[in-house]
Amino acid sequence: MRRVSVLASVVALLALLHPSLVVAQAVPPGFSLEGRVLDSTHAPIAGARVTATPDGHATGSSTVTDQYGAFNLKLAPGRYRVSVVADGFIEESLRVSALQTGSTSREMVLNVAGVREAITVSAPTPGYQVRRHAGVDQGPADDEHR
């Protein structure tokens, strides 16, 4: 118990002497995009990739949803295309304008992708062959013509 008190006293003393140390631990200023990714039954989709791409750029920052389908991205001010992809679902996207500070919350619902199947048939070459024999009459067998 005494150890906890000493540790708390040291932290408080450091905060008084060097407030910059405490400020460095605070959440950085900026805009926060948070939300959840759900399926059509409103069940969370864990492991979905959420990407915010600034206008005029080919790539952006991304994160992966947690077990509750939740995500959080810190964004610089500007306009973004936010896209969400997950295995077995159709990709969704929306537009977001990030301000200098603040946050917005979005709930994105992904629809299940259609089932696609492919069947590949292969056979060893050369495949089937038909044999022909020379001199064999393949006409009808008729006793009168023999």
Image (tube, rainbow, N blue to C red):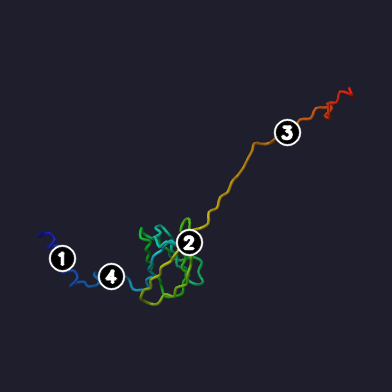
Callout 2–callout 4 Cβ contact below 8 Å: no
Q: Closer to the observer: label 1 or label 4? A: 4
Q: Secondary structure at mark 2?
A: loop
Q: Is residue 31 left or right of residue 59?
A: left
Q: Closer to the observer: label 1 or label 3? A: 3
Check disc 4: other Cα within 10 Å, few if <14, some if 14-19, many if 20+.
few
Amino acid bearing label 2: Asn
Q: Is residue 36 above or below residue 29?
A: above
Instruction: Locate residue 114, reporting x and y percent.
Output: 53, 56
Q: CA distance from mark 3 to mark 2?
A: 50 Å
Q: Quadrant of the C terminus?
A: top right
Is tag 1's residue or tag 3's residue first in the polypeptide sequence?
Answer: 1
Amino acid bearing label 1: Val
Is tag 2's residue or tag 1's residue first in the polypeptide sequence?
Answer: 1
Instruction: Locate residue 41, reporting x and y percent.
Output: 42, 61
Please tell me which residue is depicted at 48% across the width and 65% down the height of the picture: 92
Q: Is residue 136 above or below residue 76?
A: above
Check disc 1: other Cα within 10 Å, few if <14, some if 14-19, many if 20+.
few
Q: CA distance from mark 1 to mark 3?
A: 90 Å
Name the mark on residue 26.
4
Q: Quadrant of the N terminus?
A: bottom left
Residue 102, picture quadrant: bottom left
Identify residue for label 1. Answer: 10
Identify residue for label 3. Answer: 129
Identify residue for label 2. Answer: 111
Please tell me which residue is depicted at 36% across the width and 58% down the height of the picture: 67
Callout 1–callout 4 Cβ contact below 8 Å: no
